Image (spheres, grey):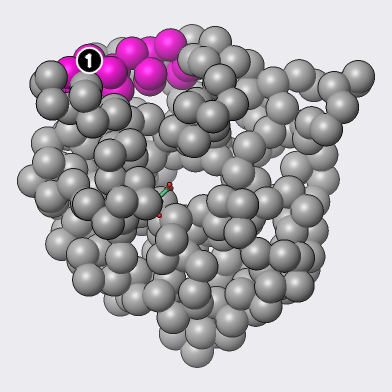
Amino acid sequence: MRQKIVAGNWKMNKTLQEGVELAKNVNDILAKNAPKCTVILGTPFIHLTEVVKTVDSKNIKVAAENCADMASGAYTGEVSAAMVKSTGAQYVILGHSERRTYYGETDAILKEKVDLALANGLLPIFCIGEVLEQREAGKQNEVVKAQVENALFHLSADDFGKIVLAYEPVWAIGTGKTATSAQAEEIHAYIRSVIAAKYGKEVADNTTILYGGSCKASNAKELFAQPDVDGGLIGGASLKAEDFYGIIEAYN
Ligand code: PGA
């Protein structure tokens, strides 16, 4: 079902102790101000178990930022979807542009990760988005369509219904340069039309599509007010409880 979601992506920030403290602070704020959207904390692997224990699962769900493209075995340093699931996390962020760019994650690799996540009962938050040159060449629609098709369109309608999409223009991530609400709406509506063409209108209407890229308290309300923007995936502004709550509050 289409939901409103504000999801944090801590990336490679916070020691275990700092992360638990941040989770506790977000939890305390939400205990007093019940969120009107689904709130997710995306944390490094080592934080997951403690963050799950720290937060009230009624108000906060927990996500990993990645999982392996293999089920188990001799893959030193990797963390499987089953391991993530065993921490109590419910979601996993997959296909973030930093994973694609710095760690060579291709659509084919991401397809494996999506399948393993779903097979292990994790809900993927699947990231797509174009880089600046692609936007300047007017190719953003083509790029996001291919990313969705290549990694997700092998799924049954049932399984596709478990995916949360996050449109994150790479030129807006960590740059302070947000897409305008009109730019976000235009491409979110396009993504929804691509889903409708493959799975039908009902599935498309039920798909949650988040915006990510320099989203903060000051622009969240306008972005989230767009009919096809169902919330945000938040990097920098998820690292302080008050900043993150400022975005969650866009739905209150
Ligand atoms: P940002 O990151 O909010 O710091 O731009 C968003 C993301 O990468 O998910």
* Image quadrant occupied by the C terminus: bottom left
Q: Which residue is mark 1?
A: 142
* Image quadrant occupied by the N terminus: top left
The amino acid marked with disc number 1 is: Glu
Magenta stretch: includes residue 52: no
Residue 121, above or below 246:
above
Q: Position of residue 97 (x, y in %)?
A: 44, 33
The secondary structure that dominates the magenta segment is: helix
In front here: 22 or 210?
Answer: 22
Magenta stretch: includes residue 151: yes
Residue 66, above or below 227:
above
Residue 246, above or below 67:
below
Q: Residue at x 22, y 71 (%)?
A: 218
Residue found at the far left of this picture? 182
Q: Residue at x 22, y 15 (%)?
A: 142
Q: Position of residue 174 (x, y in %)?
A: 37, 51
Q: Which residues are magenta?
A: 139-152
Secondary structure of the residue carrying numbered label 1: helix
Q: Residue at x 55, y 57 (%)?
A: 10
Q: Is residue 159 left or right of residue 80?
A: left
Q: Residue at x 12, y 36 (%)?
A: 186
